[in-house]
Image (tube, helix red, strand yellow):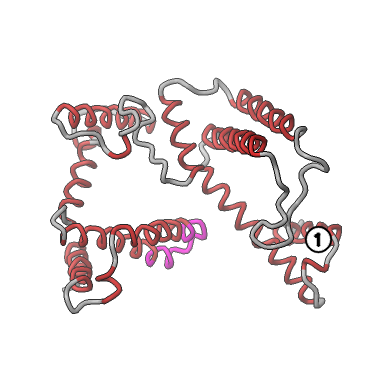
């Protein structure tokens, strides 16, 4: 008889326990919660990359690698007596049931918006019960537990954090009435950045694409650098809100653009390499011409 899903999961749990046990793998036995964190982030991004590529075979492997992180943390926690993978599964199952009363209870939710409103209300109720029971605040609520923004981690990528923060604020009505207001804000923030650039030392901003470790970077007064950073951050925040308003994921949108840029630039490199040259040996006009050709390769008419 083939293994059941439960048996497969238990086998993976037992393999992880064996790797961490005396006589197991020296590398696995040396790992800690902190040493594993970078791998968790890396595996999560590799899952996203496989999805973006629609590589379903690769996705099965990447999801397995991500599940390994859960098993790793759970095994280490079990060894120190904090919790086990059973506790992780129990909390997950309970949360899924409790936060879907429209499926497992008698609450009505006809649309996705209804579900999200119920979800936020349930989370708020859970927080109040935890505090009333003396359970204390979670690590993400320490700053201001009463805020609608409490619980948005500052450790996540900045674009995603901006998306979550603005989404939370929008849920309580703090949002632009229409997308035109967002574009007005974009023009406003662009103008503010341009005004700060008037204070930029002569001859003005220039590319610093030579040297190592940013050695070609132009020296700036610290107060100007701070203001420019603020204005650029404001621009990013408005762009994230435009993406949110259009129901687009800004992180995915930027990753798609990154891949597009990479493919086009590598096509340029290949064309130049065929003639025995590098991008550094080509003029800007030639690079621009090749860039347009690379775009044409993607969308031939």
Identify which residue, 19 or 181, lies in the foreground.
19
- Badge 1: residue crowd in 10 Å (few <14, some 14–19, many ≥20): some
Q: For the point 58% across and 53% down, which residue is it?
A: 256
State the residue position of label 1.
287
User: At which x and y percent is residue 274?
Assistant: 78, 76
**The magenta segment:** 49-61
Quadrant of residue 19 in the image? bottom left
Whether the magenta-drawn stretch holds residue 300 is answered as: no
Q: For the point 83% across and 66% down, which residue is it?
A: 282
Q: Quadrant of the C terminus?
A: bottom right
Q: Is residue 279 left or right of residue 60?
A: right
Quadrant of residue 229 in the image? top right
User: At which x and y percent is residue 109?
Assistant: 30, 29
Q: Is residue 273 left or right of residue 142?
A: right
Quadrant of residue 145 in the image? top left
Q: For the point 18% across and 62% down, which residue is it?
A: 6
Q: Is residue 98 left or right of residue 186?
A: left
- Magenta region, main secondary structure: helix
Whether the magenta-drawn stretch holds residue 50 is answered as: yes
Relative height, residue 281 to residue 54 (above, below): below
Task: Check disc 1 and report its element: helix, strand or loop.
Answer: helix
Q: Is residue 100 left or right of residue 57?
A: left
User: At which x and y percent is residue 69?
Assistant: 31, 60
Q: Is residue 186 visible?
A: yes
């Amino acid at each position: 008889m083939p293994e059941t899903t439960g048996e497969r999961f238990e086998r993976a749990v037992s393999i992880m326990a064996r790797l961490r046990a005396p006589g197991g793998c020296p590398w696995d036995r040396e790992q800690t919660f902190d040493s594993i964190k970078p791998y968790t982030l890396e595996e999560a991004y590799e899952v996203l990359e496989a999805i973006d590529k629609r590589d379903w075979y690769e996705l099965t492997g990447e999801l397995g690698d991500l599940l390994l992180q859960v098993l790793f943390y759970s095994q280490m926690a079990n060894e120190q007596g904090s919790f086990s993978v059973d506790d992780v599964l129990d909390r997950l199952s309970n949360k899924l049931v409790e936060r879907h009363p429209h499926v497992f209870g008698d609450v009505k939710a006809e649309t996705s918006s209804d579900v999200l409103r119920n979800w936020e209300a349930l989370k708020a109720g859970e927080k109040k019960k935890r505090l009333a029971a003396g359970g204390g605040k979670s690590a993400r609520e320490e700053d201001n537990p009463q805020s609608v923004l409490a619980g948005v981690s500052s450790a996540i990528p900045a674009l995603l954090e901006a998306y979550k923060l603005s989404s939370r604020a929008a849920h309580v009505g703090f949002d632009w009435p229409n997308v035109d207001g967002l574009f007005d804000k974009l023009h406003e923030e662009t103008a503010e950045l341009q005004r700060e650039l008037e204070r930029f030392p002569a001859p003005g901003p220039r590319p610093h694409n030579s040297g190592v470790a940013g050695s070609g970077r132009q020296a700036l007064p610290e107060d100007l650098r701070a203001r420019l950073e603020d204005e650029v951050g404001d621009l990013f925040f408005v762009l994230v809100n435009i993406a949110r308003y259009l129901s687009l994921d800004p992180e995915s949108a930027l990753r798609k653009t990154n891949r597009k840029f990479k493919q086009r630039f590598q096509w340029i490199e290949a064309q130049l390499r065929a003639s025995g040259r590098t991008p550094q040996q080509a003029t800007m006009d030639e690079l621009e011409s090749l860039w347009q050709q690379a775009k044409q390769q993607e969308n031939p008419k």
